[in-house]
């Protein structure tokens, strides 16, 4: 009796199918999740590129930038590291910039939300046809405290230049993790931090009315 039971293969196909289907479902859902992670990567990259572009044509978030460059020798080059860097972030409902660069919430909001009403929340508003989008429109779920905007002197421009110094502007992300639908609680996938996705441009004549 025991010997016959040991040789019996009744139900073996069901057991094998259960094992295979478990692996197949895990593999399929893994492809879906990592495909969505790739979408988030691309959206974040586009958002920082747009943010850098908006920062280059908008009034600076660090208001001290306008008068930060030296003026003792009119016409002389503004050498690298002559001022700043001013690194501006948003934390706990308020913003701050390093090196004494006062944070301008309206200018930050213009980069984050585009040409919409200035608020201090993370809501990303719908856009009218004649409004310019902000970073949040290209990366849904982006928060203000994820965005870092830095202005630094890299040897561009000259002293007493009309319109102020010409900074190098870097926009990047911080403290942002990938979002997973199915694998979130598996192997710590929820803790995978997204790279900074930084984008660097040269500042132009910084003004909020630029196209």
Image (cartoon, rainbow, N blue to C red):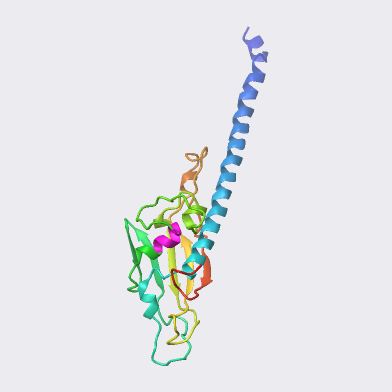
54, above or below 126, in the image: below
* Residue 153 percent coordinates (x, y): 46, 78
Q: Across the whole image, how many numbered discs are drawn on residues?
A: 0
Most foreground residue, 118 or 179: 118
* Residue 111 is one of the magenta-drawn residues: yes
Tell me: 32 left or right of 57.
Answer: right
Most foreground residue, 161 or 16: 161
Tell me: 9 left or right of 73.
Answer: right
Most foreground residue, 188 or 12: 188
123, above or below 61, in the image: above
Residue in the image at 36% along x and 53% along y:
121
Residue in the image at 43% along x and 50% along y:
125
Most foreground residue, 75 or 184: 75
* Residue 67 percent coordinates (x, y): 37, 80
Looking at this view, name the residue that lies furthest to the bottom.
Answer: 73
Tell me: 23 left or right of 88.
Answer: right
Give the residues drawn in magenta, as a range. 108-115
Residue in the image at 41% along x and 74% along y:
85
85, above or below 14, in the image: below
* Residue 80 percent coordinates (x, y): 47, 82
Decide whether the magenta segment is chiefly helix, strand or loop.
Answer: helix
């Amino acid at each position: 009796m025991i010997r016959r039971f040991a040789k019996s293969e009744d139900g073996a196909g069901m057991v094998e199918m259960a094992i295979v289907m478990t692996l197949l479902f895990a593999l399929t859902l893994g492809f879906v999740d990592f495909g969505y992670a790739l979408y988030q990567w691309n959206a974040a990259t586009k958002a920082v590129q747009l943010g850098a572009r908006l920062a280059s044509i908008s009034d600076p978030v660090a208001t001290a930038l306008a008068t930060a460059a030296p003026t003792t020798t009119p016409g002389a080059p503004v050498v690298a590291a002559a001022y700043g860097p001013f690194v501006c972030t948003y934390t706990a409902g308020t913003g701050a910039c390093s090196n004494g660069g006062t944070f301008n919430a309206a200018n930050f909001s213009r980069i984050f939300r585009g040409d919409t009403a200035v608020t201090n929340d993370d809501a990303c508003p719908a856009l009218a046809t004649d409004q310019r989008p902000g970073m949040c429109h290209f990366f849904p779920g982006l928060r203000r405290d994820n965005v870092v905007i830095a202005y630094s002197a890299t040897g561009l421009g000259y002293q007493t230049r009309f319109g102020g110094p010409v900074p190098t502007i870097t926009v990047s992300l911080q403290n942002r993790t990938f979002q997973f639908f199915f694998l979130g609680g598996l192997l710590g996938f929820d803790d995978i931090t997204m790279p900074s996705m930084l984008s660097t441009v040269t500042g132009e004549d910084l003004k909020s009315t630029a196209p």
